[in-house]
Image (spheres, coloured by chain):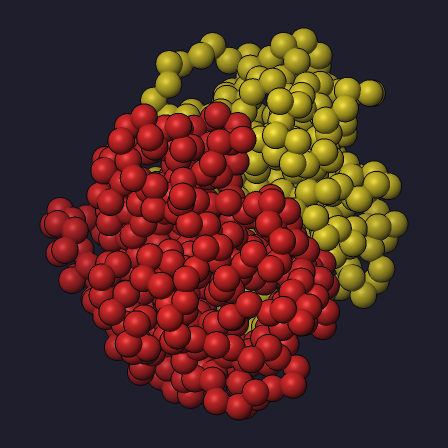
Amino acid sequence: MQRICITGMGVVSALGAGRQPTLEALRAGRSGIGPVRYLHTRRREFPVGEVPLSDAELAGRLQVPEGAVLSRTTLLGITALQEALAQAGVATADALISGTTVGGMEKAEQALRDGTPLSVPCDCGSTTEAIADYFGGFPLRTTPSTACSSAANALMLGARLLCSGQADIVAAGGSECLSDFHLQGFASLMILDTQPCRPFDAGRTGLNLGEGAAYLILEREDNALRRGARPLAVLSGWGNACDAFHQTASSDNGEGAFRAMQAALQQAGLRPGDISYVNAHGTGTPNNDASESAALRRVFGDALPPVSSTKGLTGHTTSASGSIETVFCLLAMQNGWIPGNCGFRTPDPACIVPTGGVPATLRHCLCNAFGFGGNDSALILSAYA
Amino acid sequence: MHKVYVQACARLDRLHPDPDFRSYLSPMEARRMNLLLKRTLVTALEAAGPVCPDGIITGTGMGSVENTTACLEALLNGTGPRPTDFMQSTHNTLGSLVAIRLGCHGYNATYAQLRHSFESALLDAWTQIRLGDLHRVLVCACDQVTPALARMLTQTGIPVDPDSYTAAAVLLTDHPDNALAEVKQVSLSRGTEPVKADFCRDDWVRLYGDNLSVSALGFCDAVGQGGPLILANDWTRICIN
């Protein structure tokens, strides 16, 4: 089977807009989590990982025409996709597969607050359409919406469309902005921390919401080489499984996560011992981190590779987390180190002990993204050689 | 590449009235579910039959809208969303509910592409069966349009009929025994040459009203008719035989 190569990547998160500021913040372990700056909400007690640019600044950078109304999810998506397309050296692709869950919800909130008609469609699919329309092309457009695994699932569909020959080059990932809907919704589930989150720490009490977008340009190796593109890495494995346990809680033994990681390893033709680093979902909620740890122990036994969660730096970027953290894995592979697990101090017997901030040669990275509804996804990124 | 066959269809819409939900749901389950969840679950159980599928793929343009609306209203009046409304507002709550009920740990995905959500779900299922990654996939399509949602969509140039709850489920497999039809092609490609279609969106809207899952209902109708047929929903094309 043809390898699925990654020839471009673009990212925006609380760490900044673009690969370079992202890399610098990741290497320095500089968290982007802080008090609310831009989000319209009355719940100011929760720290968030906001992209450090206002809507107007994002629109200005993109030279969006005066008067055009774009949701923040769309603006973040365009910002990341522009960088990915530029790196791949293409203007558009056969498909845009862009995961999101709140879509343009913040525009609906605004219209309701102001008592004005909606200025722009707010549904998930419309943000994908708006991102694609900015560039033109992208005849195939679709929107996986599986909560926090959406972007990971977008990458899987992209890979499969390439494997089956339905597309030659695709852009896949996800975008999600902060919304009052999400902030207060997560608050109602009592899983937000009023302090910076502490994934895998014994004293963890919840997550911080983040926002952002990331896309990867995927193509079959023959297509990449034919047009003279330089593969950055290979998307070698992918797996998705359903925990089928509860709408928002994960099972104690991490059944769905275990199956997703197993499926990704099988797809990649790798053994657990081949994995050099795991970027965990690691949200910082008591339930997720314990369940994910149980699944990791089932997959790796006593030979656990280095594991870290980067959510202490970005917050939980929800639907975009799968592609944002895939970009983090690729940056880590290119620069030979393991990103740190910000916020961790005290080991929890129920959890794995994260490692991070250390140099390492990374050949195969496993990246986890788990969503509500027990929607568990795992991706494997391999060095191109 | 493997071939893809339709083994079963089930649907609830304005021409196909609700069954007695008590034969599918316990009283406690029924109390917790709104009408969209109930119809989604019942059509899924009918189409899936007794065997757990190895994939469940759902298309829904807006998810469980009444829960989303309740959350938005709670933001506006300052009370904050109720946990149940927030959980059920997430689009993949529908597909996840089906997985929990069927005890299905396999592949699970949801697509939200407004009027083309069913085609998105079908594309994923068709692709994975063709590749041999999955063998038995339940494709669900469900949408609810409330008067409030109809108003909001109409404001942004997307007319829909208010007050509809539509659910359809289709079981796809890679074996032809007892199949109702073969799915030859699924394409979501804008800008391609217009193809003469046997059935299109207008035909289905006349029958079922303008709701977001109307193409799934049209698919179920066409599967029962036999012969090669092309189904068109704007720029999407499904070819069955």
Of residues A208 and A283, the one nearer the viewer is A283
Q: Quadrant of residue A53?
A: bottom left
Of residues A364 and B34, the one nearer the viewer is A364
Tally of numbered tags: 0
Residue A201 lies left or right of residue A26; in this view the side is right
Q: Is residue A58 above or below residue A192?
A: above
Residue drawn at point x = 48 percent, y = 72 percent: A308
Residue drawn at point x = 80 percent, y = 44 percent: B52
Residue drawn at point x = 63 percent, y = 76 percent: A290
Q: Percent from the top left, x then y, of residue A367?
A: 50, 59
Check the picture and name the quadrant holding the C terminus of chain A. top left
Residue A149 visible to an observer of this rendering? no
Q: Quadrant of residue A332?
A: bottom left
Residue drawn at point x = 55 percent, y = 15 percent: B230
Q: Is residue B50 above or below residue A26?
A: above
The colour one sees for chain B in the rendered image is yellow
Residue A206 visible to an observer of this rendering? yes
Residue B124 lies left or right of residue B7; in this view the side is left
Q: Is residue A191 above or below residue B218?
A: below
Q: Percent from the top left, x then y, of residue B103?
A: 78, 54
Of residues A81 and B168, the one nearer the viewer is A81
Residue B65 lies left or right of residue A176; in this view the side is right
Q: Percent from the top left, x then y, of residue B23?
A: 88, 50
The colour one sees for chain A in the rendered image is red
Q: Percent from the top left, x then y, of residue A287?
A: 62, 76
Check the picture and name the quadrant holding the N terminus of chain A. top right
